[in-house]
Each structure stands twice: as C-alpha cells, then as structure tokens.
Amino acid sequence: MALFKKKGPEEPAAPAAEATAAATAEEPVFDADAVDAVMKKFDRESNTRIWEGWQKWVVYGLMAAFSLFSIYVTLFATWLDLVRYPSFVACIMLIGYLNFPAKKGVQKVNHIPWFDWIIMILGTCAFLYIVVNAKDLTVRAVGYKYLYWYEIALGIIAILALFELCRRSVGIPIMVVAGCFILYAIYYFWIGKGLSFGNAVSQLTYRLTYTTTGVMTTPIQVCAKFIVVFLIFGAFLERTGISDFFISLANCLAGSSSGGPAKVAVISSALCGMVSGSSVGNTVTTGSVTIPMMKKTGYKPEFAGAVEAAASTGGQIMPPIMGAAAFLMAEYVGVSYSSIIVRAILPAVLYFLGIFICVHLEAKRLGLKGIPREQLPKFRMLAKKLYLLLPLVILIYLVCSGNRTMAYAATISIMACIVVSLFNKDARMTPAVLFDALAKGGQSCISVAAACAIAGVIAGCITMTGLASQIITAVITIANGHLIVALLLTMICCIILGMGVPTTANYCIMASTCAPILIQMGVPTLAAHFFVFYFGIVADITPPVALAAYAGSAIAGSKPMRTAVNATKLAIAAFVVPYIFAFNPAMLLIDTNALEVIQLIITSIVGMVSLGVALEGYLKGSVPWPLRIVAAAGGLFLIYPGTLSDVVGLVVIVAIFVFQFLRNKKQETPAAA
C-alpha cells in the first residue's frame, strides 16, 4: 500500500551519504486516506462508524454531553458508588455502540443494524437499572439470594454487552483472558463451593455487577474520577496546535545534526506521545512526517519505522501525563500522582536517551548528515509560541502543589487550552472546535473505559476466588527464592498479556496478579508496579504482536517483523531499567539522597552510551563483537546504582574507548601514508 504520493517520476536510490545532502526540511506529501487506512488496520479505536449530516451532530452531541457530564460529576457530584459508576458505564455503552461497528471495514454511512440497537439499549438499560435502584439494592441485595431473577438476567446482559463492546473497541486478546477467569470463577463456585450451576452463575453475576468488587472496582473508579478528564484535556490540548509546535521544536533542536530527522522523531514522539497516550496513534500521526524524512536522509526503512515506533511507545512513560496507567498506579500503590511522575523522570530519560544514542551512532556509521540549518525553523520564531506550553505548566503546577484534586487540575488546564488557542490564529478554538474537542474527548474514553471495566472483571474473579494467592505461591515455588526468575516470569506474562491490549487494562491485570508476587519476593511496592507498567507498554513493539512497530513498517514500506526486532533493540532501556530498579530502587529515587541521585544520573547516562555502542557496533569505527559484549557489561554496571559497580563499569568503558581510539588511529596511519 503506497502511503505517500509521488511528485513526478521516482528517482534512483542514492547512497546513504549522498542521500543526506538531498534531504530537505520540506514536509512530505502524504496520502491522508492511506494513513487513515493504517490507523484502521492497527488501531481498534480508529475503526468507527461513519456519520454524516444531522446524524453526525446527534452522535457528536451525545459524546460532547458525556464529556461535560463527566467533568461535572468529577468536580461536584457526591453520589453513591452504585449511582456514579454504573451511570458512567451506561454512558460508555450508549456512545460505544454508536461508534464501533461489529467488525472492521464497515463503511456504510449513517447505519446501525437492528441487532446493535438491541444490544446497545439492553446493555445501557441494565446499568441504568442499577442507578435507578441503587438505594434499594444497597439495603436489600446483600447476596445473590436477595436478587430477583430478572436482576440476575440484567446482570448477565450487562456483562455480555460490556464484553462485546470491549471486543469491538479494544480487541480479542483481553476477551480471551477475561473469559478464562470467568470460567474459572464459575468452576470455583460450582465445584469448589458446592453450589448448583445456576447459583454459581448468580453468585458471580451478583459480585461482578451489583457490588464494587467487579466491573465497578478500582480500574473503572479511577477511569471515571481522573482518566476521563485527562483524556478530554488531551483532546483540547491537541487542538491548540501543540503537536506541530513539538515537531518544529524538535527540528530546531536536532534537525541539523547527524541523522537529524531520526533525532527529530525521537524528541517529537516523546513530547507528542505523552499527550496522546496511544503508541499506535502517535506512530502513525508523527510517523507520517518523520519516517519519510528519515528514509530520505539515508536510514533504512526498517530502522526508520522502528525509531518512530519505539519513541512513540515510550511516550506513555514520559512524565507528566504518562498515559492513563499513572493514575491507576497512584490509586493501587496509595501514593500521590505527583510522586509517581517525579519518580518516573529518570527511567523515562534513560529510555529516550538510549534511542537517541542509537540513532546518532547509526547516522555516524552510515555517514549521514542533517538538514541544512537554513531550511529549519528558527528558535526566535518558535519562542513566540511558547505560550502553547502554558496548559501543561499549569497542569504540572496544580498536580504537584497538592492543593487541588487531579480532576480540578485537568479542568483548569482545559480552560487554559481554550485561552491560549485564542492567541494562535491557525488553531483558534471557535464554538465548533470546542464542540469537536468535547466530542473527541468523549470518544477517546470509550476504549479505555471498556478496557478498565473488563480489567475490573478479571481483578474481581481473581480476588473472589483467591486465585491471586495461588498464583503467588506457584511463582514463588518455581522461582525457589531467586528474584531474577520471578522477574523473568513476570516480564513474560506482561508482554504476553500486553499484546494488543491497552496499557491501562494490561497494567490493571498485572497489578492484581504479578505485582503482589514481586512485592512478596521483597521488591518495594512502587518498584514492583513500575516493573509491570514498563513491560506492559513494550508489548506494543515486542514481536510477535507489535502493533506500533507494524504500523511504523506500513508507513516505512519495510518488513514488519524486522521493524519490530529493530524497535525492540532500540528500546533496550525499557528491558534493562525495570530490572535495575527492581534490584535497587534508587533508580526510582527511593531511599536515596541528592548526592547519590547526581551520581546515578551521570553514571546512568554514560552507561546508556556504552549500551548504545554495544548495540550499534560503532565508536569512531566498527567495534568487534567481543568488545561489544564487554561494552554492554560495562554499561549495565554503570546503570546499576552503587559505587563499586560504577567504578567497575567506568574502568571497562574507559578501556574500551582507549582501545578503540588507538585501533582507529592505527588503521588511519597506513591510509594516510
């Protein structure tokens, strides 16, 4: 599939070094329809119904109303839990079925089949029944035996409708996982507790729908309280033109250096990704600009697609937004959100530094140059648009000050987005744009809320059956007291469960199952949760189901699996750093002091350089394999916090640098003669 329209006849490919000279800062002419097709192929959230005319205004009006409703409830409502959360899920059911068709590729305009109407109405009404009868259910329904038969039937309908919405908006993998846990829970009540099959189903239905231990548990609570408002904030922030500003800023900072477009991709994807919260979406939107530029500079297609995928995926670990999982982590761990983002800074910096070093060394190895400075944006011109950062600054200040709730901080930041847009004539928020931002904000909540609800079902099944303790016991037995074995098993679980599953849902599942294992093995609580968080994210670039990498390969015109392997290599920090802070939480600024932090920052940066040399095999010339292995070991020693490990790592790296310098000098001398 050709994503980019050609301007005139295609020219023969130039050598890498010569191709660089031909690179310009002109934006490539890309086929927006083809890019949209890539989104629909790899991103479930993009497979939505097509609405036009007055029907579009009705659907968008409902989504905008949902956004306003969510903001109001978050800021002012003091409702019962059985009113607040079922009403939130009921709204998601309504707008969810209005947006997502039963299968991909449905292009019929203004059409919903009759069976979708039935599922939507029944599912929405099932949750609204809980809202209307909340007080009665709170007093009367203290067990499944106290529910009427039709209430059990409504509960089953609610769960089935929720599963179907999750299948449409999120995908099948999480459905398989949740289905297995539900079958186990039925078996537990039926065989384990000796209930009849009907009573086992009734007991499970009661727990999952009429209490706060199933659908309405922590994930959906955090989604309704915090995540939804931040997603709306993201929709407003996007309409201020900040994404274009980030790309221009990245061009200004790194565009002229060796292999400039790849460095622009790293910086812009880090900045845009923390706002978008979608690795696939960010890969396609920023990649449609950066990937052609990287190829034009001289990077191989597999490498160009991998750079964008790795950087876009890492946007979810970039403070201060960090995707929706950061709010869930704050709730699970019981610490403030500001504490989470402060502790996430160093690992995130190391992640992007690792990618940045790799693209720099690759550029040096290929002899690539950057974009001529005269073709790049001037900083004095960009400085005039620094006001676009004001909403983010306000958000960070309000969240870190602790004087206001996170929802209040997000709401004020939304208002700031509206104000700053008035100063940008190219992205000024008219009433129509405000309406569209509210609608898109509501639409972006559907898949996240559906995933959180199903994650609540999984967590509820694990809790009510006592499966969590059995899993913990099994893994500890297999690990036999060896933490590294438990970490490896946890990493594998996170990557498998994260394949095609949103980070939020993946984190919720792993926080309920694997994080307690690591905590029981002696890993600090926050470090254990960061561990599962990181490996849930990198599933988007880890083969065989590396959706972000495959999206990047579609734009780059490269081989998908090779692109995914390259992306995994570039994201090496995401595979190394979690082990480091699991063994020594100083990486997360836990139990450390200012001097140790400074030492840790310096040595970790040098260590990432050494790892980059090991991965790329280049340092002022090619580096032989034995030396690359030694460089990797030295880098790991430096990244691991500790004076002894730092000294060993530093000695190793200095020796490598000296050896490589003398080796290159010896090779250059005969050439000069």
Image: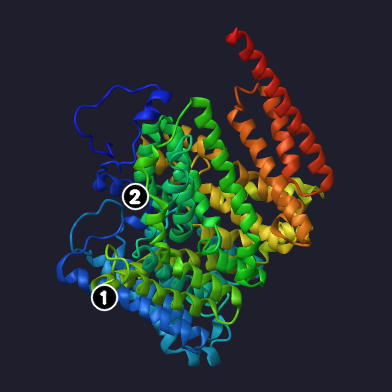
Give above or below for 419 relative to 107: below
- The structure residue drawn at horizontal position 57% and vertical position 68%, both measured from the top left corner, is 328
Q: Nearer the viewer, residue 34 or 252?
A: 252
The residue to which callout 2 is attached is 39
| Residue farthest toward the right in the current orientation of the protein | 644
Q: Nearer the viewer, residue 185 or 542?
A: 542
Q: Is residue 113 left or right of residue 524?
A: left
Q: Nearer the viewer, residue 638 or 467?
A: 638
Quadrant of image for the C terminus: top right
Mark 1 or mark 2: name the one nearer the start of the chain: 2
Q: Secondary structure at mark 2?
A: helix
Spatial CA span between label 1 and label 2? 24 Å
The residue to which callout 1 is attached is 61
Q: Amino acid at mark 2?
A: Met
Q: Amino acid at mark 1?
A: Gly
Q: Is residue 147 visible?
A: no
Residue 141 image point, x, y percent: 54, 87
Residue 300 image point, x, y percent: 43, 29
- The structure residue drawn at horizontal position 56% and vertical position 47%, both measured from the top left corner, is 352
